[in-house]
Structures are given as C-alpha cells and as structure tokens.
Amino acid sequence: MSHAKVRVLVAKPGLDSHDRGAKVVARAYRDAGLEVVYTGLHQTPEEIAEAAVQEDVDVAALSILSGAHLTLVPEVVNRLRAKGADDVLILVGGIIPDEDVPALKEAGAAGVFGPGANLDEIVEFTLANLRRRGA
Amino acid sequence: MDLVDRLLDGDRRALARAITLTENEDPLAGDLAAAVFPHTGRARTLGVTGPPGVGKSTVVDGLVHLERATGRRVGVVAVDPTSPFSGGAILGDRIRMRRGASDPGVFIRSLATRGHLGGLSWHTGSVVRLLDAAGFDTILIETVGAGQAEVEIMRYAVTTIVILVPGLGDEVQAIKAGILEIADILVVNKADREGADGLVRELEATLELGAGSAASWKPPVLKTVATADRGLDAVLAAAHDHYLYLESSGSLQARLERELNAEVRGLVRDLAGRAALDWARSAGAWDSALSEVLARRTDPRSAAAGLVTRFLGRVQRKSRP
Ligand SMILES: Nc1nc2c(ncn2[C@@H]2O[C@H](COP(=O)(O)OP(=O)(O)OP(=O)(O)O)[C@@H](O)[C@H]2O)c(=O)[nH]1
Ligand SMILES: [Mg+2]
C-alpha cells in the first residue's frame, strides 16, 4: 500500500521582501492536499536547489517580484540539473511581463503565472503537469 | 539495491528518495529498512520539543551551526502538522534553519504528521535510521509545537530538550501537562524578554520537588537567546554531559535494548495479527465470525479468540512433517 503525497517547494529567490503572494499560494496548495515546504525570503538559487533535493519535492514554485526572473530562473534550473534533480517541475509566479514568458519557458519553467493568475488555476496546472518520478 | 548503495555512499538525492519511499509506505520501504539497518546505531540523537513558536527551529539552527564547527555532520528531521481538513501541510521549519541550507555536511528534511498524533511523523524512527546510515553523526529531531508532553520523542532521541519562553504563562500549563518530566535539558529561550529569570527559578523549584535519587540525572535549566546565538553552547555541552552520564551509568545500553525489544515485540504483534487476519479472510472464517458478532450471538473477544485458535491450529498442522 502506498500513500504518496505531492510535495511542493515554495521559494522566494532574490532580494524582494514581500512574501504575501508566496504564502497565499502555499496555503492554496495545502488546502488542495499537497505538502508544501516553505523556505522564506531571500533564498539563493543554490539554497533553493539544495532544499528541493533534500525535501525530494515534485515541484518547485518560485515567486519573484524583483524583476530579476530572467537571471534567477535559469540559475535555479542549472543548480537543480547539476544536482541531478532535473525531474522537478518548475513554476514561476510574480510580476512577470508577458514578453518574458517565452524566455522563462525556454529556460525550463513549465508554467508562468502573472499577478492576475487565480489560485485554482495554479493548483490545477500543477497537478496536471506532475512528472512521473522513479526511484 | 542501487538506491541503498548510493545512500550509504552519501548521495543526497538517494537519501532524499529513500525518505520519501519510507514516508509513502512504498512496497520497497521494507527492503530498504532491512538493508540499511546494519549500518545504523552510530548517530547521536537529540530531540527538541516545546509549545508553538518558542524558537525550536531557531535553536536547532544554532545547534547545527555549533556541531558543524566541530566537524560533525548533522541531519535534521523537522515535523509540522498535517491539516486534518485537506490532508495537506505547510512545512515551515526551514525558514529558521538558514545557516545549514547550503552546507554539504547538513541535511534537513521536513515531515508532515500525516495523521499521527504525538508531535511526530509515523516514520520518524525509520527516517532517523536512514540519516544514521547515510553517515550523519548528530541527528536533531524537532517535534510539532504542542503545549503538552510529546513523550514519543523520548523513543527516538537519546536526549530530549524542552523549550519554554517567559511571558506565555505556560509554565503552569507545562508542569501540569507533564512536559518537565520528559526533559533531560530545559531551555528558557527568548531570555531577552522580561521574566526569564523568574521562569528559570520557577522551573528549578518545580524540578527540585520531583527530583529523584542523588545519583540520577538532574535536568539543567538553561537560558538562551537563540536569535543571537546566546547560551546555545551551554545547551550543547549539557547534551554532551547527558550522553556521557547515560553511557557511564549503563542506561544508554539499557535504553537501546528496551527500545529494540519494544520494536520487535510491536512488530511480532503486528505481523502475527496481519497473518491471522489474512488467513481468516481468505478461508471465509472472517465473514461467519463477524455475522455471529453482528447477530450478538458471540461477543467480539470470543470471536477473535476463536479465529486465533483456528489460525494457530492450522499453523501447527502445517508445520508437522
Ligand atoms: N526575541 C526572541 N525571539 C526569538 C528567539 N528565538 C526565536 N525567536 C523568534 O520566535 C519566532 C518563532 O521561532 P521558531 O524558531 O520558528 O519557533 P518554533 O518553536 O520552531 O515554531 P513552530 O515550529 O512553529 O512551533 C521567530 O520569529 C524567531 O525569530 C529569541 O531568543 N528571542
Ligand atoms: Mg519550528
């Protein structure tokens, strides 16, 4: 008998100091029955990748309001790859201009959610795009 | 199993995945536990418990930092509650455990209770063994914040640290709830706040009342300001003293034997019960016994005893040549 639970890392890379949005998303995931590891503000890409490995998460949801998403997202992806954790689904949320979305997807983000995204949509997208992971 | 070799080799992803398989009660988890067991028994375990928000995670972060300074590798198991409504959880202890966050000598894993009561996860013991086998020298276990005595932590941690803070008015509560009885070390954290000295005196007086024989361990009451790293070296030193005390008094070995004895006994019950149930269900004995109970012709205990007797008879017949 197996009781797998979906585990999500909600992380805030970079320097901005507002985590209201990240907390709201964390709660929405919890209310949908997911286990959310929340790591707080000002995380470096290395800390995020290392937390994703140790916590063995299925998903890393990055909340970025600082405008530095075009550098931060590829850095997190590279760190994850370097650790062999390229099976983690990467989502990005925050203040992301439409024209940056293709570049983020190119960098490895499976989904990008702007300020207007609603929570149900985020949770649904997450659950629909989970990757099957082996041992 | 390749995963086991990688785990024993110190591969962090293998360790993380092994913990997940264990938590999920995956069919592989039993073999995994069996394969790592010969490699366990080396790590020193420290439990940290206390009411919500008293600074457990901040203290753990400080203790990790101090242990790392001596070169020891540190594993952390941090437990937070599962929501009874959704089955989800927010695991937030890492927020205060930043210093070990990118240190290869530190491994932090957050676990949800998943319905287990008592401030821990169902699989705390197994996860501690995985960390032990992966070579972590010290393993810190943070329980869910709860106002009552989480006695289960004593099973997994050789030394239990109970944290309280001044001004919560929780000293009387704590005493009533028996939280002092599980403490090997009492910490008054947030000693930068008013009332710390008073709380220390009160706790010392209460401990005096319940003190055992002159030869037994006397829990020290230590003041800390975890956010400023003040007093944590004394906490670690006390934990070390406690360990030496257990070792020299023979209690460490006795405790280990007691725990393993209880674990095997529990598993015998579990496995024997399961075997009897499996037989009863497949042999049809279950349905007839249960309908007798439902009709109130047989009481539950007699029905169970009858099933067990028949199951044992079958086992005996089978084992004869
Ligand atoms: N003033 C003061 N605040 C502290 C001290 N230690 C911790 N805190 C603060 O207390 C709050 C809670 O700290 P945590 O370490 O998360 O407490 P916890 O017991 O792990 O909390 P739960 O796991 O949620 O039960 C944080 O805001 C800390 O910064 C201290 O010594 N003095
Ligand atoms: Mg905590």
Image (spheres, coloured by chain):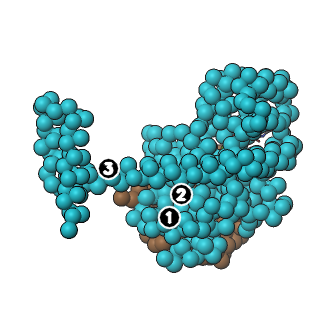
Residue that mark 1 sits on? B33
Q: Position of residue A25 (x, y in %)?
A: 56, 49
Which chain is drawn using brown?
A
Q: Quadrant of residue B163?
A: top right
Query: Which residue is located at x 62 percent, y 49 percent?
Result: B254
Q: Circle 1 sits in a helix, a strand or a loop, which is it? A: helix
Residue that mark 2 sits on? B126
Disc 3 from disc 1: Cα separation: 21 Å
Q: Position of residue B202 (x, y in %)?
A: 79, 22
Query: Which dot, 3 or 2, sits closer to the camera?
Result: 3
Query: To which chain does the residue with label 1 belong?
Result: B
As rendered, which of B232 and B112 lies closer to the eye? B232
Q: Amino acid at mark 2?
A: Ser
Which chain is drawn using cyan?
B
User: Dot 1 surroundings within 10 Å: few (below 14), some, or many (20 or more)?
Assistant: some
Residue that mark 3 sits on? B273
Question: Is the C-beta separation of discs 2 and 1 under 8 Å?
Answer: yes
Q: Is residue A93 left or right of residue B69?
A: left
Q: Circle 2 sits in a helix, a strand or a loop, which is it? A: helix
Query: Which dot, 3 or 1, sits closer to the camera?
Result: 3
Query: Which residue is located at x 72 percent, y 30 percent?
Result: B212
